[in-house]
Amino acid sequence: MRKVLLIYAFSALICGALAIPQVKLGQTTLNGRDVSDKVEFYGGIPFAEPPLGSLRLSKPVLKTRIDAKIFNASAFGKTCTQPDCLTINVYRPTGTSSKRKLPVLFWTHGGAFVVGSSSRVNGTGLVARSISRGTPIIYVSFNYRLGALGFPQGQEADDRRALNLGIHDQTVALQWVQENIHFFGGDKAKVTMAGTSAGAVLTQIQLLNPNTEKSARGAILESGNANTLRTYPAARNELVWQGFVSLVPSCANISTSGSAFGCLQAASAQEIAAAVMVSSSNTDFPWDPTVDFGRGSVLQDYPSQLYAKGKFSRLPFIAGTNLDDGTVFAQSQEVTDPDIKTWILKQHSPPTTSQQALESVTDKLLELYPDDPTVGSPFGTGDELFGLPSSYKRRSALVGDIWFTAPRRQWSQAAARRGVKSYGYLFTQPLGSVQPELGVVHGGEQPYVLGQVPSSDAAGQSLSAAIMDYWISFIVSLNPNDARGVQREWSCPRACH
């Protein structure tokens, strides 16, 4: 009898260890997988109808149910620009009850609006940290359309109300969370949006829509802002769009016709993907968000104008930058004063003020950012040139401040004037795995935020734990300083801001 009991006990132990994590989503059972002893994962869940055929280059359609009794959610979905890429993923503490109502982090990946996917951003470490500190959270990530399929440019896209489709994907993913996160034990009233680089840009654009207050209660912006890149009406990039269409073999002969959408909707995914990559190499950020003045748009005016009018959500946020955000975008070849001036003027033309004012500001920038390597980026490296021309450090400093630091300050100041609580940070820890000329590189904070620092790096692990505690504390309480986890020391520098 004792042997029989031991066999039953052993069988129960084995069955428990092999049990597949499951969630009931409406009438469908999702089969997930364990990604650690504390965290389970459900991925590749469709949140919108596949953007195929007539739905390509169209706004997303929320998918409210899965037409299957059982759905394999053990892996990520396809990456964009592949067909049927609009999927969402959920990481949660193992065995979370649907009645738990945990706070939710909604993560938007970066990648210059051309590359990247949710599969590259692993939420396991962050969720595990939240469990160990006694404040568990749920982590959600998703895919959005990229390149020409996500951010079409030109007059035809404007006429068809087909601008900023990637942002509409993000909006629908947020809507999916509102309707479904309770099945996973999440609280739809406690959603914090977050992202890095392009993901932060898209997240802050969401903040420029007052209706976002219905879908989220806070945000974390890592090196990205609605003003990070030039934001203009779509017609400004007509030639970029025509150049893209000309690279799609089956549509090349109608690239200047102003009516290429039908052809592009019928083109193969391979044609589209190849054309996106080639066209993306021809200019800086050809597929970025555009101003859309029409009804139902997600970016109805220039961000600076929306700030001035107070047309944004009153949600608290964390916003910060990395010390050397600009290095990865700077050119390594020698550039002269006229080269830099031309680059700045091109980035901001046509100006929202006068051409004379733009040129005056540009001249002032060149004066304030001299060709002196001791004050260039990567900062704090003296006159070291890393075998590159001195103009590299000068342009790196300019890019970092124009694209990241100044927009972050502008947004924080605009929010403060309207009584919005915000927190800031400056990340200064260089990654040992990157070239020294990149310094504290753009995106270098992400391994620390996600708990992906090598176990051999004790100091890095300690820093990562502190950063995760700040983020988790904000996600749970909208205050990054809840005094749990790693004890963080704070000494105010000479000029706190």
Image (cartoon, rainbow, N blue to C red):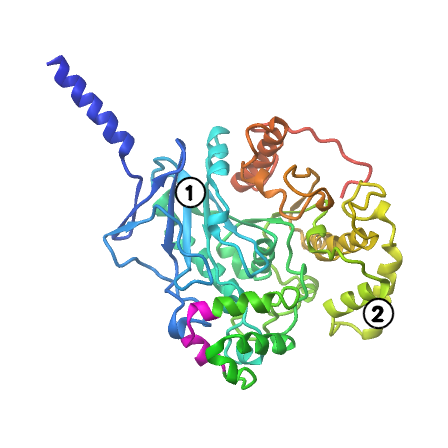
Q: Looking at numbered disc 1 in the image, what kind of residue is underneath it? A: Tyr
Which residue lies most toward the bottom here?
257
Q: Quadrant of residue 322?
A: top right
Rendering coords of residue 459 (x, y %): 63, 28
Measure the alpha-carbon separation of dots 2 and 1.
49 Å
Rendering coords of residue 242 (x, y %): 58, 78
The residue pinned by badge 1 equals 91
SS state under label 2 = helix
Which residue lies most toward the front here?
387
Q: Is residue 22 above or below residue 117?
A: above
- Which of 241/300 is in front? 241
For the stretch drawn in magenta, what is the main secondary structure?
Answer: helix
Give the magenta range: 260-271
Quick check: is 264 in the magenta stretch?
Answer: yes
Rendering coords of residue 266 (x, y %): 40, 76
- Which of 80/311 is in front? 80
The answer to whether one can see residue 148 in this image is no
Residue at point 55%, 65% (across, down): 277
User: Any mark on residue 359, and which?
Assistant: 2
Q: Is residue 127 above or below residue 9?
A: below
